[in-house]
Image (cartoon, helix red, strand yellow):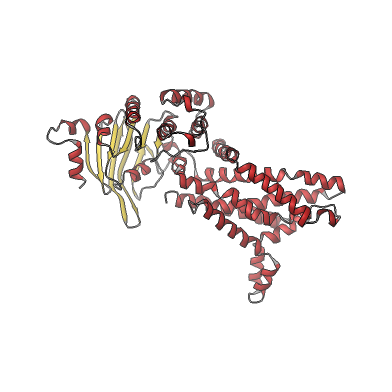
Amino acid sequence: MKLYIEKLMIIFNREFTGYFRTPLASIFLLVFLALSAGMTFFMGQFFQRGQADLNSFFVWHPWLFLILMPAIGMRLWAEERKSGTIELLMTLPVTNSQLVLGKFLASWFFTLLAIIMTIPIWITVNYLGEPDNGVIFISYLGSWLMAGCFLSLTSCLSMLTKNQVIAFIVSTISCFILVMSGFGLVLASVRSWAPLWLTEVIQSFSFLSHFKRIQYGVLDLTTFIFFISMIMICISINIFLVQLKKAD
Amino acid sequence: MNLLEAKNLYKSFGNINAVSDISISLDVGEVIGFLGPNGAGKSTTMKMLTGFLEADSGSIEIKKIDLSKDPINAKSIIGYLPEGAPSYSDMTVKSFLYFVGKMRGLKDELLEKRLEIMLKDINLSEVQNQIIETLSKGYKRRVGIAQALIHDPDILILDEPTDGLDPNQKFEMRKLIKSISKNKGIIISTHILEEVEAVCSRTIIISSGKVLLNKETKDILKNKKENLDSIFRKITK
């Protein structure tokens, strides 16, 4: 087990520091911070609402992650396959699960760094009023879990192509479908022809429905299990795809 | 001492039989030259020997360890230079070698020592802090060799190690292979017949996935009527 984690950490470190070896990390962090602040203050009307909470901040996260998570995750496997380093990597004494987990965790913790960098907004709302910090903490946690779902799905899809742009587009579309399946308009159009159980199934897969509950401070077991199991399913498929597609 | 024993390997991709019934045995001190025209199945065989691809049937034993049953331990005995010498182009030479060494399970102290030896022996000292992307083809190939040798493996598998190098670099590479071959088993795939004559103790010629010739190189060279070049052309026609 110790050796398993050691190798996983070596992969993690290479991938995590890899974000900072190119301008990717700084561009991503800058775009994420600028967009989340812009959306919170201008579109979310943070001040005009006059409420001591961060709803106007978290409400945009599913939409932001929709674009930004595929941007982080698109390179995870597509680049390895294009440059041929996958052959080098997979002839090292390491298992597929160590590789997949190491890469995924690196991108997930990079996202955590981006999320942590928005903490000044939390400080601001505490300075202006008396928010429920428990709700805000749960929202942060939920936001990170949701980012993990987007990333694990992107990592999985990035294994299917050698082209990062294709990986990005397909991942964004897939994430969009997962977000939109809980959108009122979509559900209403499905409800008009589909049986109730199908509508409920579609809704239960929606990131939006689950994230809305978290936003109000409700991180119940169902939502927690939903996000964790989505991540685990994607990682398992990713491990399988690595074995299947490595030599294509 | 036997290092590698591959028996009756078969591999097909859809309807194409890439490798049909190839068997290879490698001993300490032996350098096998793996020759064949393009698409003969050289790279596919090497990918199977290193555990990157699974054979459809047949067995591979690395120092008596079954590669399919215990890939982690079997892979740790092999050093591999894939075709085109891929490496992480955004890393520096030193950090890349350090990464591979760590993945190979070398402890810090030993890794530092091995890094020093690699940088010196493979003439990488002057570019050790340079980003790999900025290096010339010759240097990139040397980085590939260094990563394959970092853990001082018993078996070295090199897929076209001199491809794209200039004559001086080719000479240096062959000198290096010869110098490390005494206590290792090495398999080299190449198109260049003179390379086989220069460094390989055994020659295996394959075409359409089948072994057509498997002989000691010195026995081939003894034949005054036919040289390796004419034999190659005759049997791979």
- Work out whether residue A72 or residue A246 is closer to the camera in this orientation and state it: A72
Which quadrant of the structure image shows residue B178?
top left
Number of numbered discs = 0
- Is residue A217 shown to the viewer in this render? no
Q: Residue at x 50, y 26 (%)?
A: B111
Relative to B83, does residue A37 appear above or below in the rendering?
below
Relative side of B119 to A18, left or right: left
- Is residue A152 shown to the viewer in this render? yes
* Quadrant that contains the N terminus of chain B: top left
Relative to B84, does residue A205 appear above or below in the rendering?
below
- Work out whether residue B152 or residue A171 is closer to the camera in this orientation and state it: A171
Image x and y of residue A69, in percent: 62, 51
Q: Residue at x 25, y 33 (%)?
A: B194
Q: Residue at x 49, y 45 (%)?
A: A80
Image x and y of residue B181, in percent: 33, 27
- Work out whether residue A93 or residue B61 is closer to the camera in this orientation and state it: A93
Image x and y of residue A161, in percent: 49, 53
Image x and y of residue A45, in percent: 80, 56
Relative side of B96 to B10, left or right: right
Q: Residue at x 64, y 44 (%)?
A: A27
Farthest residue, direction left? B225
Relative side of B75 to A99, left or right: left
Which quadrant of the structure image shows residue B186?
top left
Which quadrant of the structure image shows residue A199?
bottom right
